[in-house]
């Protein structure tokens, strides 16, 4: 069918309905009545039905004011400007919530900015100091005069007062040009300023602080004073080369400090000052080189000349090889004098009309003709005194007198040690001459040869005088005090030496003098003769010396041979044939018993032993015959004569001498004994 003639059934199907028309047109719904249809809602008709239009293209079918959606931009920060990069289309005549019709927001998340400006999104372009530069790019946002800190920083001008290319704020000396900014002591103040202000010293005017001269080694500071040595009275390092050089420049009353090292001799004339070592006497030497005197001091000044803390060595001179003191009064303190040799006197020190104070000083291995260490010589009327205190004089020697000291003046030794000195003459320790006097206070003398002191002296306090009697290299008193050897009688001599020399007995060989055994009660001495009883004969072992028993009559010694009679009898050295306790020899000797035949045996004992005694008168027949009593009647008379004459010739009767013959000898015996009663 055709829309123009729907009354005709062109297809002859018996229907002329519009839906049969082949030329129907598509109409589009126009729900918003804006004359444009919604392409999504159509109707096929010959004529547009109500609410439909022939034109499509209404992309906003519910908004009569729009046929196409409008592009809106997301306004995240709600500042009325949208984000061009985040858009959406809406069929709204006005922007929906969260969107904006414009895309002008260059800072979509910064509600305060729609463009980045100078500082960028999120940062306000504030200009606090109103200098035309926002704070975000202003290096000094609160300083209208600076937009960058520069050298000095915000708020401080980069002024360079001294024009040295360094701003004052970083110039360690802003008022004085110092481009090198030298600050050797790192105290943030330029050296030139410290020197100019006087707060830093530059004694040698080399433009460097003294402390830096010292710290870098340009100058030495041996005395640790903080000043370079060349600016002071210091010897050594960058100071004076010799002590003499310093002395020539020093004033009286000053002190010359001397660094460690070895220095040549020096001479002093009427000076009153101090020469003192810095490191002490064991590191600082005055050396004569074995060909010169080390120190010479002449004359007095207002102040005394002092030498402190040196080893004075290898001096060589006719006198005072270490030091010559001539009409002067020096102080010598904490020194060592060693290996000085004087061909005359005073190996270490020679004092002529001098009064010196020598303290805490050692004199070792010095030698001289006399006074190996010290020699003094003062006029008799002089009041000068040489004081030596707390000092050691050891192993010095003299060819003649005074191994350590020879004094012809006034000298005082206080708490000194004088030992192992040797003199070829007198006074191994000290020789004090008739001139002057010597006083010794609480000092120690030991092992000086040939003696400790020769000459008069006054001893005060606890002085010690000792030797080395056992030649073991140790002072006797030291061995005694240490307990190494005994000195039971406290006489300063080891017991062993007294015993070996015979000065003390030791009869019991226990190493203790007998006198000490007795005094200490370890041995008895009943007869108080100084010999322990155990050393005396005690033949009967009753603990009492035989001599005491004899002397007191407690025992007998009839033959006075010092042996008890009872012991002689017991030992068999003497007989007591009649067992009466009296030696036979004593009975015979004192006539209390007979021994007519002089055989040492009492006649009664001979008889008891079998000798003939025909008449039993207790007298041996042989003895009676010998005396001419041939008939044993107790008297020599005519009967006896007749017996001789009758038996003349070989016979036994009338034979007085028992020689087997009666002859003139027998006749003589009778005649000699005539009338004698036996």
Image (spheres, helix red, strand yellow):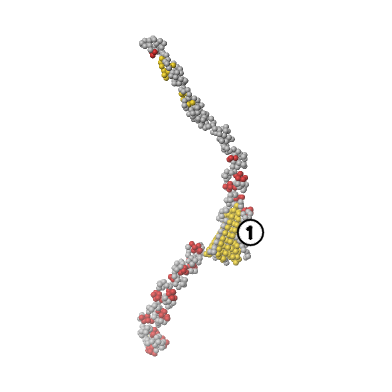
Query: Residue at 62% of width from left, 45% of height from top?
Result: 196
Which of the two residues, 328 or 349, is positioned nearer the viewer here?
Answer: 328
Q: Quadrant of the N terminus?
A: top left
Residue 130 coordinates in the image, percent (x, y): 57, 33
Query: Residue at 38% of width from left, 10% of height from top?
Result: 9
Q: Quadrant of the C terminus?
A: bottom left
**Does 23 appear above or below 122?**
above
Q: Which residue is mark 1?
A: 300
Q: Secondary structure at mark 1?
A: loop
Residue 270 coordinates in the image, percent (x, y): 64, 58
Crowding near pointer 1: few (<14 within 10 Å), some, many (20+)?
Answer: some
Residue 36 coordinates in the image, percent (x, y): 45, 18
The answer to whether residue 168 is visible is yes
Question: Would residue 567 be found to the left or right of residue 181 on screen?
Answer: left
Number of numbered tags placed on the structure image: 1
Which of the two residues, 147 or 184, is positioned nearer the viewer here?
Answer: 147
Image quadrant in which you'd find residue 620: bottom left
Furthest-top residue in this view = 8
The answer to whether residue 244 is visible is no
Image quadrant in which you'd find residue 624: bottom left
Residue 611 coordinates in the image, percent (x, y): 36, 82
**Does 180 appear above or below 100?**
below
Image quadrant in which you'd find residue 641: bottom left
Question: Would residue 581 be found to the left or right of residue 503 on screen?
Answer: left
């Amino acid at each position: 069918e055709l829309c123009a003639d729907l009354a005709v059934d062109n297809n002859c199907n018996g229907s002329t309905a519009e839906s049969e028309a082949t030329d129907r047109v598509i109409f589009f719904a126009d729900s918003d009545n804006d004359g444009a249809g919604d392409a999504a809602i159509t109707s096929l008709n010959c004529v547009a039905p109500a609410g439909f239009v022939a034109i499509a293209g209404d992309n906003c079918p519910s908004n009569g004011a729009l046929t196409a959606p409008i592009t809106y931009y997301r306004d995240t920060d709600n500042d009325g400007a949208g984000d061009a990069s985040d858009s959406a289309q809406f069929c709204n005549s006005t922007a929906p919530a969260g969107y904006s019709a414009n895309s002008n927001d260059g800072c979509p998340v910064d509600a305060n900015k729609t463009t980045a400006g100078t500082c960028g999104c999120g940062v306000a372009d504030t200009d606090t100091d109103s200098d035309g530069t926002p704070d975000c790019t202003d290096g000094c946002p609160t300083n209208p005069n600076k937009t960058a800190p520069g050298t000095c920083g915000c708020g401080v001008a980069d002024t360079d007062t001294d024009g040295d290319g360094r701003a004052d704020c970083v110039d360690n000396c802003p008022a004085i040009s110092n481009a090198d900014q030298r600050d050797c002591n790192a105290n943030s103040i330029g050296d030139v300023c410290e020197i100019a202000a006087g707060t830093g010293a530059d004694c040698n005017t080399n433009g460097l602080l003294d402390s830096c001269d010292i710290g870098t080694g340009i100058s030495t500071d041996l005395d640790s004073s903080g000043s370079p040595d060349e600016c002071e009275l210091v010897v050594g390092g960058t100071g004076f080369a010799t002590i003499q050089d310093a002395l020539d420049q020093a004033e009286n009353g000053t002190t010359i400090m001397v660094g460690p090292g070895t220095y040549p001799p020096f001479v002093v004339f009427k000076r009153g000052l101090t020469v003192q070592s810095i490191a002490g006497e064991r590191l600082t030497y005055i050396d004569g080189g074995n060909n010169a005197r080390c120190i010479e001091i002449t004359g007095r000044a207002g102040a005394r000349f002092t030498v402190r803390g040196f080893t004075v060595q290898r001096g060589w001179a006719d006198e005072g090889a270490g030091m010559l003191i001539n009409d002067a009064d020096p102080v010598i303190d904490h020194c060592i004098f060693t290996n000085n040799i004087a061909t005359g006197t005073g190996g270490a020190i020679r004092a002529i009309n001098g009064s010196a104070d020598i303290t805490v000083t050692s004199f070792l291995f010095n030698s001289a003709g006399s006074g190996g260490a010290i020699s003094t010589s003062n006029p008799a009327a002089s009041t000068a005194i040489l004081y030596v205190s707390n000092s050691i004089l050891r192993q010095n020697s003299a060819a003649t007198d005074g191994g350590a000291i020879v004094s012809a003046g006034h000298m005082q030794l206080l708490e000194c040690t004088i030992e192992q000195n040797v003199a070829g003459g007198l006074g191994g320790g000290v020789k004090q001459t008739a001139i002057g006097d010597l006083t010794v206070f609480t000092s120690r003398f030991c092992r000086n040869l040939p003696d400790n002191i020769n000459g008069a002296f006054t001893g005060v306090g606890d002085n010690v005088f000792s030797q080395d009697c056992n030649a073991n290299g140790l002072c006797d008193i030291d061995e005694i005090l240490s307990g190494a050897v005994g000195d039971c009688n406290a006489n300063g001599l080891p017991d062993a030496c007294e015993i070996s020399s015979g000065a003390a007995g030791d009869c019991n060989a226990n190493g203790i003098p007998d006198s000490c055994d007795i005094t200490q009660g370890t041995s008895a001495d009943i007869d108080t003769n100084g010999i322990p009883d155990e050393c005396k004969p005690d033949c009967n072992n009753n603990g009492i010396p035989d001599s005491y028993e004899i002397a007191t009559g407690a025992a007998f010694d009839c033959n006075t041979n010092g042996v008890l009679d009872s012991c002689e009898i017991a030992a068999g050295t003497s007989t007591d044939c009649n067992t009466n306790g009296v030696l036979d020899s004593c009975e015979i000797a004192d006539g209390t018993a007979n021994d007519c035949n002089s055989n040492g045996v009492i006649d009664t004992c001979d008889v008891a032993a079998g000798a003939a005694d025909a008449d039993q008168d207790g007298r041996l027949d042989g003895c009676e015959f010998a005396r001419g009593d041939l008939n044993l009647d107790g008297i020599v008379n005519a009967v006896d004569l007749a017996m001789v004459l009758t038996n003349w010739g070989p016979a036994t009767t009338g034979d007085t001498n028992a020689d087997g013959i009666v002859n003139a000898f027998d006749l003589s015996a009778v005649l000699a004994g005539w009338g004698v009663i036996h």
